Amino acid sequence: MRNVAIALLAVVALAACEGKPPSSDTITGGNPRHGLDAIRRHGCSACHRIDGVPGAYGTVGPTLQDIGERAYVAGRLPIAGRLPNSPENLQMWIRFPQRIASGSAMPDLGVDEIDARDIAAYLYHQ
């Protein structure tokens, strides 16, 4: 009986491993559809290139395409290598860039917690 239980647990674990990765809304607590609206309201496209956002061809800041595949939220000086890419860190950077890297070209835009979660969900969804 014990061997059957172990075998069953192994099958369940393997099935879970073969499943889809968690969705962007699951890992961020946000809503990608609302994130698109928040990106537009906060003017992110003025400085960044962002897939799926009409007119988002900015070149002041880095492209936000494939941000989920990066090791760090921001890879340029002065914070290169200091902010590992995680949903929490991305949301913190979106809300408080000047606290993290004073003098950065990224301004504090008054993004609240909900919008930061939604923006992060959108960016990770791409």
Image (cartoon, helix red, strand yellow):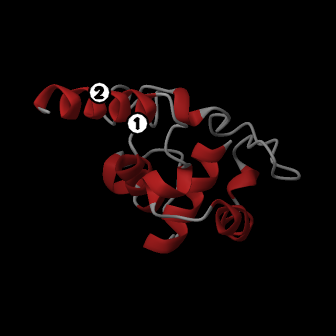
- Residue visible at 68% across and 39% down in the picture: 60
Q: Which residue is mark 2?
A: 10
Q: Nearer the viewer, residue 33 or 64?
A: 33
- Residue visible at 42% across and 51% down in the picture: 93
Name the spot of residue 73 as percent of width and height, x first: 45, 37
Q: Are marks 2 and 1 in contact (CB under 8 Å)?
A: no
Mark positioned earlier in the residue sequence (2 or 1)? 2
Q: Quick one: label 1, few (<14), some, or many (20+) residues within 10 Å?
A: some
**Mark 1 secondary-structure assignment:** loop
Q: Is residue 119 above or below residue 76?
A: below
**Can residue 48 be seen in the rendering of this structure?**
yes
Residue 16 in the figure: left or right of residue 45: left
Task: Point out the image quarter for the C terminus.
Answer: top right
Name the image quarter holding residue 32.
bottom right
Name the spot of residue 2 as percent of width and height, x first: 11, 31
Q: Nearer the viewer, residue 6 or 29?
A: 6
Residue 80 in the figure: left or right of residue 4: right
Q: CA distance from mark 2 to mark 1?
A: 31 Å
**Mark 2 secondary-structure assignment:** helix
Q: Which residue is mark 1?
A: 85
**Label 2 is placed on what type of residue?**
Ala
**Can residue 84 be seen in the rendering of this structure?**
no
Q: Nearer the viewer, residue 33 or 8?
A: 8
- Residue visible at 14% across and 33% down in the picture: 1
